[in-house]
Amino acid sequence: MKALPFSRLVLFGALFGILCSGAPAALPPAPKIFDVRAHGSVGDGVAMDTKAIQSAIDACHQNGGGIVRVPAGNYQIGTIQLKSNVTLSLDYGATLLGSTNLADYPTQGLRAAREGQSACLLYAEDATNIRLEGLGVIDGRGKPEFFPKNAGPGGRDTRPRLIRFENCEQLTFSGLTYKNPAFWGIHLVDCRKVHFNGVTVRMRNNHSNNDGLDIDGCEDVLIENCDIDSGDDAICLKSSKNPCRNIVVRNCRVSSHTAALKFGTSSSGGFINVDVSNCYFYDSPMGAIKLQTVDGGRMENITISRIVMENVGSPIFIRLGNRGRNYTRNTATGPNTGSGGSEGARVGSVKGVRISDVVAKVTFADRAKDAQAAYKGARPTTSPEVTEREKAQAGPIMITGIPGHFVEDVVLENIKVSLPGGGTAAEAKRVVPEDIARYPEQFFFGVLPSWGAYIRHARNITFKNVELQTRTPDQRQKIILDDVEGFVER
């Protein structure tokens, strides 16, 4: 899926020539190295190294590309802009430290973000062939005491992202550890030919909205061999304008306070041809897999297989809704709560989802672990009883459209889910709200009247070898079908 870079092809060609002819062949020239120390970087964690590192990047770009080397040290920086044909390579022991001063994240000259604020630590636009590699660390240091939420003029949120790349092509993220953003983590918008390999993400219990990978309207993306622990959505496909198309995720360990794998909420463009396989989702108390289109996009040809889940909330949530958000302007507000009216976009579609070979253990949220997210200011409940929210988060499989708009052609095969149980007779009689325009989290619907699966406004749903069980007795029904055409269980 990822083409070899030209320099490597040349090297392989030269070696092949040697083997075939017996004669020595000239090897391609080594890439040019631009050491940030030679451009004035100090690396003591105190001096501001923004200008020096930007100077090395600019020199690399202007001289045809190469490697910007960051030796061991602690380099404090504000916003830097990466450019075409630049490899930013961090040695073992090298850390880029985000400044804790918002003034070091200017937005002049940066393309305005489609969602949220525009500030970020690493930025690129309209660039080709950028590579971030090595054994070092990029640490945003985005703690609430430095970047309070909604602390800008008029209550505006000014927290910077860790990375924002827009309309770029041939991006490689290899190795490196990314941690502690003030807002979202790695955000790619309308990018093409992207490869994440062996990336480590540590963004839990740091601040609000700490997504891991946000892939918005991108095409031809491969995410593999990554280890992600995020505060908010871990691997999150978005489509604020263009569809996410031809996405592969494989061989990843993923944990999140909110969702291990999520499509949406931004879903104007849709999600087409996505394959997720051989992943481990764990410690995700608000749910594991959330496939959502609520802003008019279409979701088609989605395959998820070979997934093991441990200590997760609701294992599978598929939602077609009608929040109807348009992304013709920056939008960070709207009717996210309640069941008010749509913002105007047409209703999208969900067709052709296949989820297979899944083993999941659903558990109630671990209160001790939740309490570690001190930035939320929430006081852990001391009640010995499981709360309604805790029950709702650890809910069953839920597949739901809205009246007149069905989720269609979903196959669940070879699925084994263990749920906590404990549902009461009163909960078995609950009426589930439609919440057509509400921000779609499954637990917003409350405790569901079934313990295994709740399916509503759906057509052609197949359960093949789906084993659902509870660990304690439950007085609710196993499966509830409401306005469902063509349900097959075998």
Image (cartoon, rainbow, N blue to C red):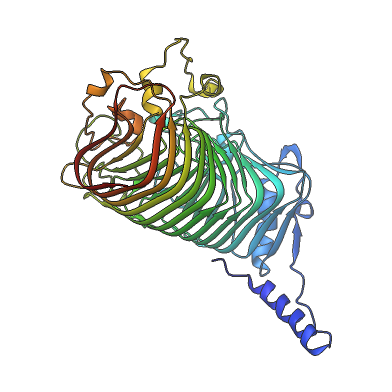
Residue at 59% over, 40% down: 104
Depth check: give the residue in front, 189 or 237: 237
Tell me if I can see residue 425 in this picture: yes
Number of residue marks:
0
Q: Position of residue 186 (x, y in %)?
A: 53, 46
Which residue is most to the left? 404
Q: Position of residue 119 (x, y in %)?
A: 50, 43
Depth check: give the residue in front, 170 or 356: 356
Q: Is residue 234 above or below residue 313?
A: below
Q: Position of residue 36 (x, y in %)?
A: 74, 53
Choose top left, top right, bottom left or bottom right for residue 369.
top right
Quadrant the N terminus occupies: bottom right
Depth check: give the residue in front, 125 or 300: 300
Q: Is residue 248 left or right of residue 240?
A: right
Q: Is residue 297 left or right of residue 387?
A: left
Q: Is residue 46 above or below residue 213?
A: above
Q: Position of residue 128 (x, y in %)?
A: 55, 65
Q: Is residue 47 left or right of residue 431?
A: right
Residue at 17% over, 42% down: 403
Depth check: give the residue in front, 88 or 263: 263
Which residue is most to the top? 383
Tell me if I can see residue 108 in this picture: no
Residue at 50% over, 59% down: 221
